Every structure is written in structure tokens, then in C-alpha cells.
Image (tube, rainbow, N blue to C red):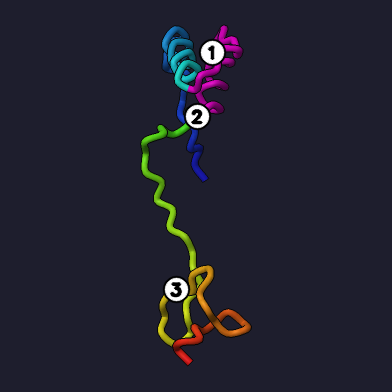
Amino acid sequence: MENLQPDYDKIPISALVSLAHLVLKRANIASIPVYGRKSAIAVIRGIKPAPPRKSKVHVKPVFALCGLCCKPLLTGELCDSLGRVHLSCQ
């Protein structure tokens, strides 16, 4: 299997340190020191900023489906004792 990690050997230390500082600034973490190549690469690989608050989260609620009409069995609807079929569908 190939190594999927990027190769940081060709990138200057100053660029790595500045990128690590940018990652820490965006993640709102100021307590981690970045001094050299090794610590900069650790910060770049390990710290990911949180997603923006305004981004849409594509999470759809999961509902059990009725066995006869295939419509969702929502909370509070009348169904049989096993929770598989609407009472109105029987």
C-alpha cells in the first residue's frame, strides 16, 4: 500500500512553521508552541479546525417505515404493539 502522507522534506522550515501557526490560529489554540520542522508537521497533521457554524449539516433523521404504506412511523403516531404498521393502515 502506498504512503498517503505528503512529503514535507522539500518544503522550507519557515513555510511549515507559518502554516502551523495559521492552523493554530484558525483552530483558536494559542497554547501549543511551534519551534521546528517536527513540531510544525505534528500540528499540521494533527489539528483540524472546526467546521463553520453556517455550514449546512446534511443529516437526515431516520424513521422506521410502515410495513404496508411505506410511510415513516413518526413519534406519537398510533401504531401496532410492535411498532411496524400504522393502525389506520390495518
Q: Is residue 37 rendered to the left or right of residue 53?
A: right
Of residues 75 and 30, the one nearer the viewer is 75
Q: Is residue 36 magenta?
A: yes
Of residues 32 and 59, the one nearer the viewer is 59
Q: Is residue 77 rendered to the left or right of residue 53?
A: right
Identified at 44% across, 11% down, the residue is: 18
Kindly report the distance in space between the C-alpha atoms of the residues bearing marks 1 and 2.
18 Å
Task: Say which mark, if any, is on residue 72.
Answer: 3
Looking at the image, residue 11 lies above or below residue 49: above
Of residues 72 and 20, the one nearer the viewer is 72
Q: Earlier in the sequence, mark 3 or mark 1?
A: 1
Task: Say which mark, if any, is on residue 46.
Answer: none
Q: Earlier in the sequence, mark 1 or mark 2?
A: 1
Residue 15's x, y, as percent? Answer: 42, 11
Identified at 48% across, 13% down, the residue is: 21
Which residue in the structure is indicated by mark 2? 48
Which residue in the structure is indicated by mark 1? 37
Kindly report the distance in space between the C-alpha atoms of the residues bearing marks 3 and 1.
55 Å
Mark whose residue sits in front, 3 or 2: 3
Q: Amino acid at mark 2?
A: Lys
* Residue stretch in magenta: 27-47
Identified at 54% across, 13% down, the residue is: 37
Q: Secondary structure at mark 1?
A: helix
Q: Secondary structure at mark 2?
A: loop
